[in-house]
Amino acid sequence: MVRWMSGTQKKMKKLLKIGKCIMYNIFDVIRVSFPFTDMARSKTRPALVISSYDFFGEKSGHSVAAMITSATNSSFPLDTLVKEYKEAGLPKPCSVRMKLFTIDNRLVIEKVGQLSKNDRQKVKLSLKKLLELS
């Protein structure tokens, strides 16, 4: 039986074969390829790593991340505006969106920056609310 792969699946398979694995830590801004719902196409987008390399990434080879969007006028719950966007490696003001996912570190295209201390505090507060942590 022949199984046909979409363009996105072929790209992912190719990236995994390369085998590069770099460490990413909490509050790193990374660039990843997000597949569309139909899995036939993908788009490169920024994301925020919200997991620790020492406690998660080193052992799993994966990172937990949140989407970053330029749709700053949206009313998605717990969207957190990144005010110091240039330091984060972003081209314009964006929001961290609490749509979380896990990604194999070999699929990360690049690290583009890191959140400032002020923006980190705001994201931490949103994560505490999301997970109902005290």
Image (spheres, rainbow, N blue to C red):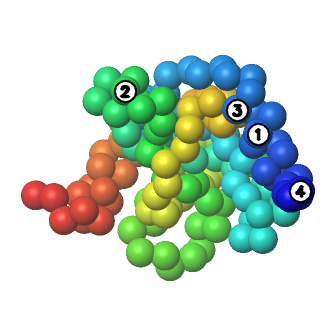
Give the residue type at disc 1: Lys
Q: x, y percentage for residue 13? A: 76, 39
Q: Quadrant of the C terminus?
A: bottom left
Disc assigned to residue 59: 2
Instruction: Say if 86 sits above or below 124 in the image.
Output: above
Q: Earlier in the sequence, mark 2 or mark 3?
A: 3
CA neighbours of label 3 inside 10 A, class few (<14), some (14 to 19), many (20+): some
Instruction: Provide the residue designation for mark 3.
Output: 16
Q: Residues within 10 Å of mark 4 (few under 14, many from 20)?
A: few
List the residue tagged with mark 4: 2
In depth, the one of 35 and 84 nearer the eye is 35
Q: Nearer the viewer, residue 108 or 92?
A: 108
Nearest to viewer (mark 1 / mark 4): 4
Q: Amino acid at mark 2?
A: Lys
Reading the image, the residue beneath label 1 is 13
Give the quadrant of the N terminus: bottom right
Residues marked 2 and 3 touching at CB (< 8 Å): no
